[in-house]
Structures are given as structure tokens and as C-alpha cells.
Image (cartoon, rainbow, N blue to C red):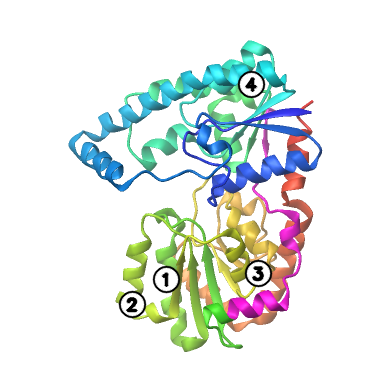
Amino acid sequence: MKIIYLSPHPHVSMHDISGPGVHIREVMHGFQQKGHEVIWASPNKRLADQPIVRKAKSGVVLKKVIKSLLPKIIWESLRDIQLLWIDRQFDRDLQQLIDLHKPDFIYERVYYLMGCGYRVAKRNNVRYLVEINSPYTIEKPLMSYKSLFAPLAERNERKQMEAIDQGFVVASSLKEFFIQKYPFTDGKITVTPNAVRKEFTEHSTAEVMNQARKELALAEDDILVTFVGSIFPYHGVDILIHAYHDVRKQFGDRLKLLIMGDGEILEDLKSLTVKLGIAHEVTFTGKAPSAKVREYLTVTHIAVLANCNWYSSPIKLFEYGSKRLAIIAPKYPGVEDVMTGDVDGILVDPDQHSLSKAIKLLAEQPEIRERYAQSFHQRVKSHYTWDVIADQILTFAR
């Protein structure tokens, strides 16, 4: 089959190491591994074959100055006008791709306010499958600020949901949200959690592990607690740091903390470790290549996700599972969809006390760590690889 993979977000690249970039890349790879031709469609031509290039510093400074002078609602509304203009412009390019390739279906990673996908699919009577990763009309004002175009975004979302042949969401909570909001979608939405590439579930070599220990200055009996991901407030990395501070009083220098990732509160977290007097025991890598992340996970003992959104399916869980790690994760639907508490890991309330207790238990009990790690590893290997997810999507493509 021929598949047009549409990502209308003007700034997300298939080359990004962030969650969206990984998801795009791996779903496309999953389709290709099944023998299908995938045509990438993005309104930003630069994203077709190279990572996004960051703007010059002078441009960033000018943008900040303009933003500071305008009321927030006006700034966000201007951003939405830009999105609408991009959407309308790309409508023509997408139509040209349809004319050229005659695809069997469009698979769209939907984005707030962007409607070219459903319009073109409807005009050409092409099967229309969509992937919905968040409640965008709710998420947008929470992540930035409200816009004058919020009512238009709601109307756009309804039209999109009316147009879909099948929708795929990453968590059961997101499925329930959309069915409650749009009852006509009942039976047209399937939960397909995030996943990991199958080859990443294989054992790592002793050479890789030794190199990782050397780079992280780990002694043989050290216990490494690790977080991987974007450094945003809702991931609760500050809670993790406080919990680690609590537990290390018992284990001393044997217990180490590794934080891999970058984001808006990274510097605040570094300052927190200084304030708590544990900066010398906490390693921050910043943004790291995927290969380096996998390398450092091979020497991790306890992998943590302290918090997440109610609608997310954190990719890091599957990365943790692929490396046979004992996992601590929050009690949210997207986590409970794929993990069973006290079988595949420890599921906790996202607070300092609960997290401290879980870290202490796993640090003290290597046999429990091993049992949880093996259980979730087998689950990931059997059910949560991208080829499995691609198969589930393609079931609805015909």
C-alpha cells in the first residue's frame, strides 16, 4: 500500500529525539518494515530530510521582546493566525501529493487547529486515519495561553472527528475523553500505546556496560537511579530529586542519580541539587543521543517516571522495559494500560513520600528489582514494539 504520513505541526521533525519525533519515525518505520511505501508530508519542507535548524540568537531575542510587549491573548492569537495560514497553504501541497501518489490512505498525527488533512481526504474520498496524542484544545491554553481562536479550534476538532475512518490514541483515558465529547466516535477509536523498536529489547554487551560505568564513574556496588525525558514541570523531576535526597541518607554514596534530558526547568533542578547538598552525586547529561541513552540505561538499576499527564503514554516506560529495568511510575491510565502494579513495577502516587518509599524498597531488594524488570521486559517484547503497533494500525487501513 501507499501511505501518506501527514504531520501538520510546523516545527516537529521526524529527526527529533523528543517523544513526538520518536513516535513519527517509528510508526513510519513500522509501516515500511511491513513492505508499504510511506510518503512524508509536512508543511515545513526543511523537516523532510534534515533536523530542524534553530533560529539565530538575534531572531530569538527580537521574538522575546515583541512577546513581552503584547498581551498574552494577542500573542497566542497571532501564533494561531500563523498556524491557520500554514494550514491553508499546505492544503495545496497535500493535494498535489494525493494527485501524484494516489495513496491508499492518509495517516495523520493531528495537531491543534490544523485541518488540511481531513479537508483533502474528504475531497478525494481517501481513507483517513488519525493519531491523537493529546486533547489539543485543552492542552494548548495550559501549555501556553488562551487564544481568541479557541472556538474555531473546537469546531475544527469536531469536523476532524466527524471525518475520521479510524482514530488511534495512546491511552484509555484519552479514548474515554473523546467518546464522551463526541459520542459518534464510539467504535472508531482504538488505544495504541507507545512502544520501542524490537531490536532494542536485546541484551547489551559487557563492553557497552563497562564503557557506561566508566563514563558515569560508577563503582561495582553502586545503585543507579535514572530519569530519561524532557525536563518539564509535569514530569515531576523535582519530586524525584527530593525523594532521592531522602533515601540517600540510608545508602550514602552508593546511591547515585542520573537525569538525562533537557527542558525549561533544567537549570532550576541543578540549583535544587546544590541547595540540597547533593550536586556531586547527581549527573545531568542534558540532551543526549538515543544511542547514549540506551547505553546508560544498561547500567541503571531503578528507572523512574515520577509524574506525567493524565492522557500520555510515556515512551520512556518502554525504553526502560526494553533494558530490563525495575520501574517506578505514577498511577495514571496511560501507565496502567501497559503495566500492572507489583507485577511489572511499582506504581505510586506522584508525591515525595510514595516515591521515596518505592526507591528505598528497590534499592534494598535486588531480587524484587529483577522480578519486576523481567516481567515488564517480556511484556514489552511481546506487546509493545513498533512492529506490533504498526500491525494494529494497518488492520484498519483496508
Left or right side of 337 for 257: left
Mark 3 → mark 1, Cα distance in angstroms: 19 Å
Magenta residues?
Answer: 187-213
| Disc 2 to disc 1: CB gap under 8 Å | yes
Of marks 2 and 1, which one's residue comes earlier in the chain? 1
Of marks 4 and 3, which one's residue comes earlier in the chain? 4
Q: What number is the disc on residue 310?
A: none
Judge by depth and name the residue closer to the eye, 266 or 318.
266
In the picture of the structure, the residue carrying the numbered disc 3 is 325
Whole-percent x, y for residue 175 in the image: 61, 36
Judge depth for marks 4 and 2 and give the one in front: 4
| Disc 4 to disc 1: CB gap under 8 Å | no
Name the amino acid, label 2: Leu
| Disc 3 to disc 1: CB gap under 8 Å | no
Name the amino acid, label 4: Leu
Rate crowding at label 2 as few (under 14), some (14 to 19) or many (20 or more) other CA atoms within 10 Å: few
Whole-percent x, y for residue 366 in the image: 66, 81
Question: Which residue shows up at 70% across the image and 80% down it?
Answer: 367
In the picture of the structure, the residue carrying the numbered disc 1 is 241
| Residue 156 visible in the picture | yes
| Disc 4 to disc 2: CB gap under 8 Å | no
In the rendered image of this protein, does residue 246 appear above or below residue 94?
below
Q: What number is the disc on residue 97?
A: 4
Q: Is residue 194 magenta?
A: yes
| Residue 159 visible in the picture | no
- Quadrant (top left, top right, bottom left, bottom right) of the C terminus: top right
Rate crowding at label 3 as few (under 14), some (14 to 19) or many (20 or more) other CA atoms within 10 Å: many
Of marks 4 and 2, which one's residue comes earlier in the chain? 4
Q: What number is the disc on residue 276?
A: 2
Rate crowding at label 4 as few (under 14), some (14 to 19) or many (20 or more) other CA atoms within 10 Å: some
Mark 4 → mark 2, Cα distance in angstroms: 56 Å
